[in-house]
Image: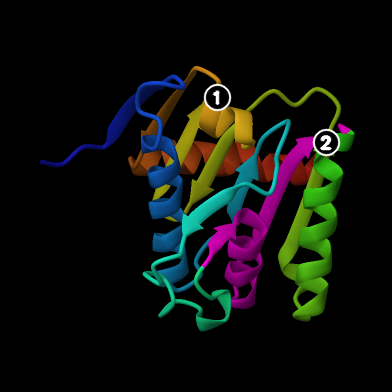
Amino acid sequence: MSFSTRRIFKSAITSHNLIRELIQQMMLSEMLASGGQRVWLVSPWISNVVILDNRAAGFTSLNPDWGEREIRLVEILVYLISRGVSLGVATSYDKHNDPLISLLEDGAEEIGAAAKLTIVQKKKLHTKGILVSRGLLTGSMNLTFRGLEINDEHVIYDTTPQSIAQARLAFESYLDQEG
């Protein structure tokens, strides 16, 4: 069965792990890809949430340095940057985002790839999305613990080239806009 668009309605009770597993698959596919276009994370509020559960060492072949533990968003993003992927993060000026921004900037600088990271902060950002080479996740969810685990959310995962291209144009335009 193939699909190009999938809608997911999540609550704290239903489809609890579905969105996390989808984000996990999106990040894994990007880790295995050859580093094409810029990956974008767009969320007014963004946290260093757990993305991969490596306690059973299932992802150790990707990065043996991770060890047998939960892997957080920043670690995955810095790993992508280390593999040559350009990363764009668009978020609001809220102080909630400061720890993630600092961790990303420090991580990119530590591996000598600060030029691969672009952080854009906007006053009125309400858009939410994750854009990778072959997929786009949009909807109501901020990339936070509450968004992934607690809040009722509606997201759409789209793999159509037209939707990916439209999102890429919209997200790339953040680079030319004032906050």
- Horizontal and vertical percent position of residue 67: 53, 76
Disc 2: which residue? 96
> Residue drawn 86% across and 32% down?
94
What amino acid is found at the position of numbered circle 1 in the picture?
Ile
Q: Where does the image place residue 1, in percent across and percent down from the top left? A: 10, 41
Confirm whether residue 179 shows in the render. no
Using residue 52 as the reference point, say whether residue 5 is left or right of it: left
Relative vertical location of residue 88 with respect to residue 149 in this rendering, above or below: below
Residue in front for this viewpoint, 166 or 149: 149
Q: Is residue 12 visible?
A: yes
Mark closer to the chain start, 1 or 2: 2
In the figure, 98 relative to 75: above or below? above
> Which element type, helix, strand or loop, lies under badge 2?
helix
Residue 78 position (above or below residue 27): below
Name the residue at 52% across, 46% down.
131
- The residues tagged by marks 1 and 2 sit, at their Cα atoms, a distance apart of 17 Å
Q: Tell me which segment is drawn in magenta.
A: 69-94
Q: Look at the numbered disc 1 and give the secondary structure of its residue.
A: helix
* Residue at (41% x, 70% y) in the render: 59
- Categorize mark 1 by other alpha carbons within 10 Å: few (<14), some (14-19), many (20+): some
Do the CB atoms of the residues marked 1 and 2 lie less than 8 Å apart?
A: no
Q: Is 97 or 150 nearer to us in this picture?
A: 150
Q: Is residue 121 left or right of residue 174?
A: right
